């Protein structure tokens, strides 16, 4: 005996949409697992994932009155699909797109900090060339340089520039604001700055290419 789930055309469409939604969630869960396990390539994953997300957005918009919560729908039909719910509901974009966006943001941030470091190196060396050797002139410049170097994650904690700037800042903090570096001290500081700058440029990824 055949049991009908619907009593009219409208109900029939609703149940057909439920079945389609169920299938999309299940397919997305399988796709996410396949991607994580390297069973499919990134390009294949992204193409299929974009299709599923597009279908899901269209269908969930159609079902917004009957299925106000996708999470509740998944619970009702005992669907254990956390990866699919995250991809379709929370994220809304393929994992590959998320990774590219994160990498681009990180690269942009790093590039800005590198530029800041270069600027602070040049400012410090130019200041000495202009004979700005008073402690209250040198200390802020070296502090800015040290702070920018510490913000750049690609540099190790024992990086030459970090340790030398720390030593100079400590030395200056023991002097009075109006005290001036001797000619020998100014020359040594300029040498340390130049040496640290060269080490900094060499430490950057793809330096010299």
Image (cartoon, grey):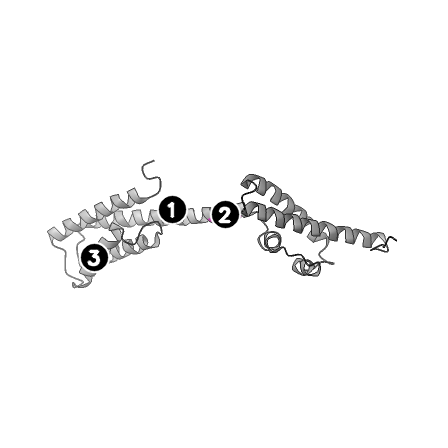
State the residue lying farthest toward the front. Answer: 1
Please report whichever mark, 3 or 1, sits nearer to the chain's N-terminal start. 1
Within 10 Å of the Cα at label 1, are there few (<14), some (14-19), or many (20+) other Cα atoms?
few
Residue 126 seen? no
Mark 2 vs mark 1: give the one in front. Answer: 2
Identify the residue under disc 2: 99
Where residue 204 appears, x then y in whole percent?
33, 44
Instruction: Point out which mark residue 111 bears.
Output: 1
Left/right placement of residue 27 relative to residue 147 reads right
- Point out the image quarter for the C terminus: top left
Inter-mark Cα distance, 3 to 2: 39 Å
The residues bearing labels 3 and 1 have C-alpha atoms spaced at a distance of 26 Å
Looking at the rendering, the stretch of residues picked out in magenta corresponds to 98-102
Residue 83 in view in this figure: yes
Residue at image point 58% right, 45% down: 34
Residue at coordinates 24% horizontally, 54% vertically from top-left? Answer: 163
Residue named by callout 3 = 167
């Amino acid at each position: 005996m055949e049991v009908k789930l619907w009593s009219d055309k409208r109900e029939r469409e609703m149940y057909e949409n439920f079945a389609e939604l169920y299938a999309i969630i299940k397919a997305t869960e399988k796709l996410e697992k396949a991607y994580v396990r390297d069973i499919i390539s990134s390009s294949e994953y992204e193409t299929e994932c974009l299709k599923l997300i597009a279908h899901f957005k269209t269908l969930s918009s159609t079902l917004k009155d009957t299925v106000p919560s996708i999470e509740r729908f998944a619970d009702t039909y005992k669907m254990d699909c956390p990866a699919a719910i995250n991809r379709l509901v929370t994220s809304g974009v393929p994992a590959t797109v998320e990774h590219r966006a994160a990498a681009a943001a990180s690269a942009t941030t790093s590039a800005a900090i590198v530029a800041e470091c270069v600027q602070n190196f040049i400012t410090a060396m130019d200041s000495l060339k202009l004979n700005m050797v008073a402690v209250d002139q040198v200390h802020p410049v070296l502090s800015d340089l040290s702070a920018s170097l510490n913000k750049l994650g690609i540099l190790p904690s024992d990086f030459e520039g970090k340790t030398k700037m720390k030593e100079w800042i400590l030395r200056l903090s023991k002097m009075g604001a109006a005290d001036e570096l001797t000619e020998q001290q100014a020359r040594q500081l300029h040498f340390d700055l130049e040496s640290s700058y060269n080490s900094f440029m060499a430490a950057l990824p793809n330096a010299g290419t």
